[in-house]
């Protein structure tokens, strides 16, 4: 009788355990945070039991205090003022090293010291009629990524004290990575972080599919805010960034000049690339290379892509036979991300 009772109890216990194994785990809800930061907008979607908006907001504050040129007390501002007591933190070191790497790989097409030239020409080249060769040459004396170094103690060294750093061409991409790293540290597997159009993502979207990102089609009207999409990509990890000069350009002598300044000669670029979309393992890398491709142009950009196996690019260019039409060219590895119609 005792043996029967023991067997019965064992059977009941086994049934309970099996039922527990078959009971589906609770599915974490999707959180959506959005707002304005760094003079742009952000949208963050992630699957988690908790809403991490307060922690993400704190990350924004820390980042602003490190790399914002609009913050009078930020670390980068102090370096630009030649504050000898300033020491680089992890945010600054990461951006500086990545910036120097991309500068070297692109022959200086990416350059975080180009801000004085941008200021000379003015937003949208509003000062273009008043810019002289003499003014450009005077600024070129202290522009160049080779003229500034960071030592092991976190101190910046400049060949010319007038040299300043501007991380705006890489900061949004890096901030997307920072938020992504935070979410992964919390065990979040599915997320998309988008700050000012620069994206870091992982896993799947709320429908369980790979994340889909649209590539905007360049528009000829510089006042048009939103155009159609040239194409779509799908991916489950990495960073995506797009840089385009099809807005904020001016026309002189029948030629279109972009809003990007060439760090080598100090003048707005005349380019055959209207838009560059880059996919990389992280958004900071994608952001920096997308910016540099606008300066390099199609042929040189493709050459760089060939030498960077972890970076893929998609370039929209004007048709050489009909300037009203667009053509697309991309690195071989980019094809696997393109969404079929």
Image (tube, rainbow, N blue to C red):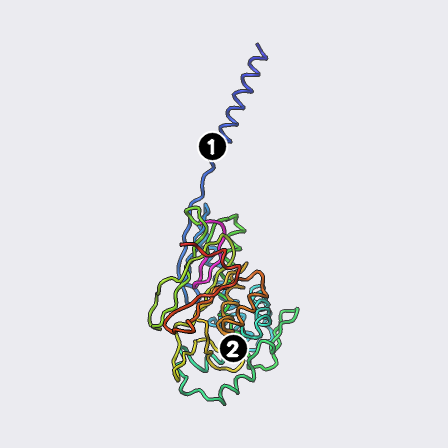
Viewer-proximal residue among 191 and 210:
210
What residue is disc 2 on? 114
Viewer-proximal residue among 131 and 279:
279
Residue at left offset 39%, top offset 68%: 218
SS at badge 1: loop
The vertical placement of 182 against 2, above or below, is: below
What residue is disc 1 on? 23
Q: Residues within 10 Å of mark 1 (few under 14, many from 20)?
A: few
The vertical placement of 196 against 69, above or below, is: above
Q: Is residue 62 visible?
A: no
The residues colored magenta run 193-204
The image quadrant where one finds the C terminus is: bottom left
The vertical placement of 113 against 133, above or below, is: above
Q: Are marks 2 and 1 in contact (CB under 8 Å)?
A: no
Residue at left offset 54%, top offset 72%: 300
Viewer-proximal residue among 326 and 105:
326
* Mark drawn on residue 50: none
């Amino acid at each position: 009788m005792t043996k029967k009772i023991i067997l019965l109890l064992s059977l009941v216990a086994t049934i309970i355990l099996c039922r527990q194994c078959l009971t589906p785990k609770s599915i974490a809800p999707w959180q959506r945070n959005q707002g304005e930061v760094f003079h742009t907008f952000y949208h963050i979607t992630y699957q988690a039991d908790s809403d991490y908006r307060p922690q993400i907001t704190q990350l924004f504050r820390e980042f602003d205090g490190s790399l914002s040129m609009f913050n009078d007390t930020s670390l980068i501002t102090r370096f630009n003022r030649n504050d000898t007591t300033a020491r680089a933190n992890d945010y600054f070191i990461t951006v500086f090293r990545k910036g120097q790497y991309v500068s070297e790989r692109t022959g200086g097409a990416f350059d975080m010291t180009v801000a004085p030239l941008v200021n000379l020409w003015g937003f949208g080249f509003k000062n273009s009629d008043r810019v002289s060769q003499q003014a450009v040459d005077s600024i070129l004396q202290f522009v160049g990524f080779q003229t500034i170094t960071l030592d092991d103690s976190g101190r910046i060294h400049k060949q010319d004290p007038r040299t300043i750093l501007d991380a705006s061409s890489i900061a949004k991409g890096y901030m997307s990575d920072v938020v992504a790293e935070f979410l992964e540290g919390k065990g979040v597997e599915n997320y998309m972080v988008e700050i000012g159009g620069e994206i870091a993502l992982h896993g799947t979207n709320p429908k369980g599919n790979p994340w889909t990102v649209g590539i905007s089609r360049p528009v000829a009207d510089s006042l048009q805010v939103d155009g159609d999409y040239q194409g779509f990509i799908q991916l489950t990890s990495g960073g995506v960034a797009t840089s385009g000069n099809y807005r904020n350009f001016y026309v002189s002598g029948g030629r279109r000049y972009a809003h990007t300044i060439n760090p080598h000669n100090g003048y707005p670029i005349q380019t055959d690339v209207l838009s560059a979309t880059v996919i990389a393992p992280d958004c900071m890398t994608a952001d920096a290379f997308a910016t540099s491709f606008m300066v390099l142009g199609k042929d040189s950009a493709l050459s760089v892509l060939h030498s960077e196996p972890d970076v893929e690019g998609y370039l929209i260019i004007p048709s050489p036979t009909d300037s009203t039409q667009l053509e697309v060219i991309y690195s071989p590895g980019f094809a696997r991300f393109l969404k079929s119609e």
